Amino acid sequence: MSAQGKPVLELTLRGVILGVLITLVFTAANVYLGLKVGLTFATSIPAAVISMAVLSLFKDSTILENNIVQTVASAAGTLSAIIFVLPGLVIVGWWLDFPFIQSFLICASGGILGVLFTIPLRRAMVTTSDLPYPEGVAAAEVLEVGEAARGSAGGEAREGLLAVVYGALASGGLALLAATNIAAGGYQKYFRVGANSVSSIDMGFSLALVGAGYLVGLSVGMAMLVGLLIAWGAAVPWLTAHPFPIPHNPYAPDDIGHYAGFIWSKHVRFIGAGAIAVASVWTLLKLIGPVVSGVVSTLSASRARKDGTATLTDTDMSPGWIALIALGCLAVIAWLLWSFLAPTPLAPHAQGLVLAAVPFVFIGGFLIAAICGYMAGLIGASNSPISGVGILAILFSAIVFVAVVHPAVDAQKALVAFALFATAIVFAIATISNNNLQDLKTGQLVGATPRAQQWALIVGVIAGAAVIPPVLNLLAQAFGFAGAPNLHTVTAAPLAAPQATLISALAQGVIGGNLNWNMIYVGFGLGVVLILIDEFFGLMKWLRLPPLAIGIGIYLPMSATLPVVIGAIVGHGYDLWAARTKSPEYSKRLAILIASGMIVGESLFGVLLALLIVLFSKDAPLGIVPSDFAWMNWIGLGAFTLLIVALYTWIMKRARAHVPAVQ
């Protein structure tokens, strides 16, 4: 209730509609970014800024209504991570495209379960926890500042919106310039190191990745740099200098470009996969105690609440609704699994596989919800190693399903596809739980009703689930996915889809018995060493180097890693400067918003370019000069550098001019 006794607006139709509209835009952007470089961005903060700017036009809008908008829109930053698994069905050649009904129901049923599974964790992991929830706290600060600024025409909210717009225009403009061929989208060169060794420099001129680098921070950025140096400074040069242990190599050593690329993609990347797997297991082991104690305390709090003294700010969805919706989702999932198996050689084993898969989805999904929620609370949803959880899930499901059916050779492809299908549902649970508790933390800080947020997030899940399949189909038709046998595409530059490619390779390797275990074993050993180093750094209070981030740095292409590293370094320098300003938190919020804008602008242009490629059946529909234009590399590098300087100059100017409000 307000001071005048009137009810405070919270879950409103206009707020839900605005949240859905933001979700549609940010989901499309995140799907493109994730398929291109294996990264997605959290959308709560930019959604909150946009909401405050739009709803400030209504005199009766409230901070709680703005919170609902960002809660709905946060599904864009989470559910879109399903593209870390779902494209695997195209990559292995099982699907030619993404059937809407199946894809929608995978995302919706898994995502809604992700919402439900985090409800019993709220009190232990949010209300009574000391987890920092960096993004949830930051979103609450943005909402509170925007509410305080309403009396001064919402100046901070509008300036924050300008930061998002400027970042989007800069990154989208640079991507447009690259699409015309006037500027290069990046620079790549292979070179010899000594007599036989080969390495490479591969730099993408991507402001979206620079923005992502700021958001992940210096620790993750430096860890990715270490991974890059391990891959291209050690592993690739050593393996190219010793060709004898490399099987199935179609390239001669003197073809250094293709040769080094083959060594990295077919061998070195699996070192990264092994390191990611070990780092993921280590993370899970560290979380077992907190997760178990959190669930126990949540159940205790639930029993104590039956005395009827609960307030609106401590009220969740009713147990009846939770049970009803959960049973409905499980029924949909069982039908999805059964209908998937019916037309395959595995149809005689459908009952056994479904009976194995449904508990895997339900029990594994709840454990993953707790794990991902805890990790997000500890280090933030953007930094949470959700792809590592996906790797463990596909390995576990593939091993279990092989034990259930012992497939003949002609049924192995179907079992690979089924393992990916079931893991995609679990991954949808993980994506939502990875961010849901952040939203509930924001709500706790601004005095929101958890029940209203939980219903709002379900709406966001459904909206995101509806937009993901058509965007995936558009991008698949325009670009295709690297390694897919059915590249019905007109461009020579398919999307890397790095996590989906890795997870597909792991499923094929486990079920087909031909996994590159030697390199994975090397990765296992490396992962143990990296864990020991990181723990030592932690004891010494030095900069941590998360082993998961190092593994990702080994696995991702250098063109994706280097801009992230640059963004992390530049962003750290800015944060050091911002800490000395009159309004450090405001200065850092501007940087977060402009980084989010960089990601949104380039990503949305990528979706638009995909549409143009499909419509005009041309690789470069916007090309106005030849693709080998002589000055394109220098123009690309110059524009990339100048735009970074211009954007940070603008936010530094605004930060210096900002006068903090009198408390």
Image (tube, rainbow, N blue to C red):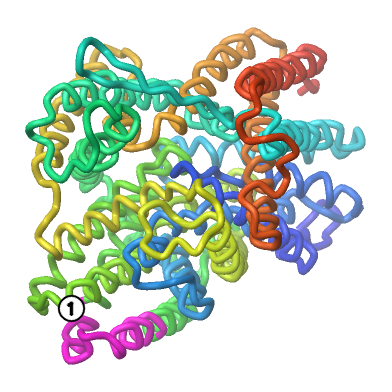
Which residue is located at x 70 percent, y 27 percent? 590
Splitting the image into 4 quarters, where does residue 526 fall? top left
Q: Please tell me which residue lies in front, 66 or 474.
A: 474
Q: Position of residue 12 (x, y in %)?
A: 76, 66
Q: Quadrant of the N terminus?
A: bottom right
Three-letter code, disc 1: Ala
Which residue is located at x 42 percent, y 45 percent? 128
Which residue is located at x 54 percent, y 43 percent? 41
Q: Please tell me which residue lies in front, 478 or 394.
A: 478
Q: Position of residue 377 (x, y in %)?
A: 42, 42
Predominant secondary structure, magenta span: helix
Label 1 sits on residue: 411
Q: Quadrant of the C terminus?
A: top right
Q: Is residue 48 left or right of residue 132?
A: right
Q: Is residue 287 visible?
A: yes
Q: Is residue 6 left or right of residue 329?
A: right
Splitting the image into 4 quarters, where does residue 358 fall? bottom left
Splitting the image into 4 quarters, where does residue 297 fall? bottom left
Q: Image height check: is 449 above or below 210?
A: below
Q: Position of residue 138 (x, y in %)?
A: 59, 35
The reply to whether the magenta stretch includes residue 342 is yes
What is the magenta range?
332-356
Identify the element where label 1 is drawn. Answer: helix
